Image: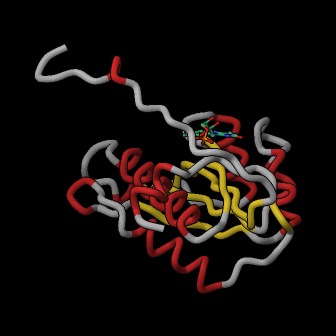
Amino acid sequence: MDALQAILSRRSIRNYDKKPISDDLVKSLLKAAMSAPSAGNEQPWHFIIIDDRSIVSKIASFHNHAEMLKNASLAILVCGDINLDKHNGMWIQDCSAATENILIAINAQGLGAVWLGIYPRKERVNGLTNLLKLPENIIPFSLISIGYPAEKKPESDRYNESRIHYNEW
Ligand SMILES: Cc1cc2nc3c(=O)[nH]c(=O)nc-3n(C[C@H](O)[C@H](O)[C@H](O)COP(=O)(O)O)c2cc1C
């Protein structure tokens, strides 16, 4: 699949086949994440691979849109390290770019995933901070639920000319 097709056909996948994901595949996702652009190349991110069912199953107790995690093979938590954020708050955009890169790499390799918003919802940030024993400088940003897809979704054409402006509003 070429890069544009991987972007255009990406959809949120919330139903999975219970099949393990190889370490090589996981590494390819992390390489994609760390290839993202970041402000001044600050790379203020950390990634936590969560494949322990007893940990994954606790997340739905403080995240009200995370039911799909029950069937996921694993999840990747993208975290921002505010000690590495040299450009005053840009870590949010850096972590967003890393998250989207993971989603596109997942789609390109026949896996399925959904982005679960964490930051800035207090109960989700606190829940993951406590559950995973995160240090103070580490902010859980997004959680990506991942598995082999057990559902197919069509490409969604969201091209909208009314949102495009040339030179001024
Ligand atoms: C910042 C952000 C937070 C999201 N949080 C959730 C979530 O908590 N639970 C969920 O099921 N989907 C979540 N999604 C996925 C969106 O619902 C989904 O991307 C949107 O409906 C468009 O559908 P698509 O991804 O299939 O194109 C989130 C997406 C983003 C970008």
Could you tell whether 58 is left or right of 104 in the image?
A: right
Return the x and y of residue 1 as percentages of the image width and height.
48, 68
Q: Quadrant of ligand 1?
A: top right
Residue ID at (74%, 65%): 147
* Quadrant that contains the C terminus: top left
Please report the residue visible at 81 percent of the width from the left and 71 percent of the height from the top: 52
Residue 127: percent from the left, percent from the top?
73, 46
Residue 80, given in percent of the width and then of the height, sits at 46, 55
The relative height of residue 42 versus residue 157 in the rendered view (above or below) is below
Which residue ends up furthest to the top in the rendered image? 169
Is 122 placed above or below 40 here?
A: above
The percent position of residue 20, horizontal first and vertical second, equals 78, 78
The residue drawn where x is 60% and y is 77% is 26
Residue 18 picture quarter: bottom right
View extreme (left): residue: 167
Q: Where 20 sits versus 67, above or below?
A: below
Q: Is residue 62 left or right of residue 84?
A: right
Q: Residue at position x 37%, y 52% from top?
A: 94
Front residue of 139 and 156: 156
Residue 89 shown left or right of residue 60 in the figure: left
Q: What's the image's color scheme?
A: secondary structure
The correct choice, above or below, for 2 with respect to 145 in the image is below
Circle count: 0
